[in-house]
Amino acid sequence: MRCAIASLLALVVAALLTALPAPVMAATYRVDDSATIPQEASATLRWRQFAPGRRTTDNTVEGGTTVQVRLNLAPWTQRNGRVFMVLPEQPLGRVTVRWTTQGRLLPGQLVSGQRALVYAGPILSPMLEETLALRIETDGTRLSSTHRLNFHFEIDVD
Amino acid sequence: MRHRSRSLCLGHCALLAAAACGPPAQAYTVSISPGSPRAIYLQVGVGSFTGGNYNSGGQPANNPTINTVSVTVPTAAVGSGAAQAMASNTGATSSFLDGFAFCNTGELYVGGFYRLTSSGTGTATLTANSSTALNNGSGSTIPFTQITWVSSGNGDTGTQPFASGTFTGNASQSIGGISSNQWAESCMTFSYLNTAVRAAGTYTGQVTYTLTAP
């Protein structure tokens, strides 16, 4: 009888173990965005002010491009998370990026060296696709040749 | 049962390990490049901007007008050594940068800008070619070395970008420079030095200004 009760308890414990979800760890992960494709090979930045000023000069160059973003969120489906777009520090100095979206990601802006929230909530689909219209600006006196901006995405999982 | 529990544990651990490792690191790249990185503009006398002044959206345009700076020397003063003030016919007193009345009537506006997508790496140089003397059409000439100018600008203090001077009669006389990413302008008031008696007549000549970017 005692053996039967022990077996029953073991079964209950085992059932509870299988019913419990895996432990959830809050952490930041790099998102696989390898399917993301910029629609233009290069964004041409032009002077915001074609001519310099008499005493103070705005040396900003600005331009735009469109990026078809595809984020592989499969590892975090059915979990809550916050997705950020990241632009690391750039050797040419401060780069400011503003973007608009079609609604699946948040519009926003970020400065090189920072990250900006583009999504918060439950991860319902393994693949998140969005079109970002980027507006990029930087100091034209430091952009003398083509420069590559390496963006990436991170996710903070609850 | 013990065996099944171990299997469950292994299953959870494998799941955790996968989550901790995450997918391979990726990054998408946007290349940015400077468009129309160099631009240069020179205005001597009248100029043209389309769409208003620059600060209200105007853009530089070509203006081929050749302006005149002149003086009529009274007979009694010819060759006296008393400098005779000259006046330009431009009527261009306002800067196309912002419409500011930078020059006064009779002065010659000289200005421009130099755009470059790098800092402190160059200066555009303004030169004047005054190598061909003024002549009266009857064989008499007056060298351009007889003409001098004083530079100024309303509201300006300090050194003028195009300093006061006298024509050298050379083909490439330096008048001044425009540093990269600056707008520079001066107003020139010309005078005829009048140091020698000349044959009667109307003397004309042309000075050509050239702005050269490195």
Image: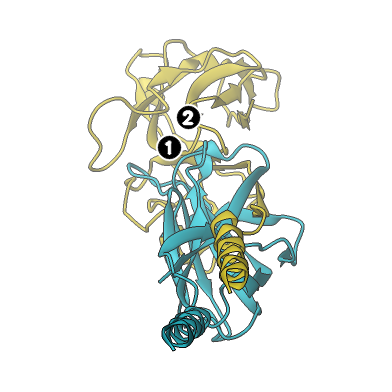
Q: Chain of mark 2?
A: B
The shade of chain A is cyan
Residue displayed at 44% across by 81% down: A6
Q: Is B130 placed left or right of B191 in the picture?
A: right
Can residue B59 be seen here? The reply is no
> Considering depth in this image, is A24 or A88 the residue closer to the camera?
A24
> Considering depth in this image, is B21 or A54 the residue closer to the camera?
B21
The x and y percentages for residue B109 are 44, 42
Name the residue beneath numbered marker 2.
Answer: B179
Name the residue beneath numbered marker 1.
Answer: B184
As helix, strand or loop, the secondary structure at mark 2 comes to strand
Q: Residues within 10 Å of mark 1 (few under 14, many from 20)?
A: many
| Circle 2: residue type | Ser
Q: How far, Cα to Cα, is label 2 from label 1?
A: 8 Å
The x and y percentages for residue B46 are 52, 50
Question: From what the image shows, is residue A11 above or below residue A84?
Answer: below
Q: How many marks?
A: 2
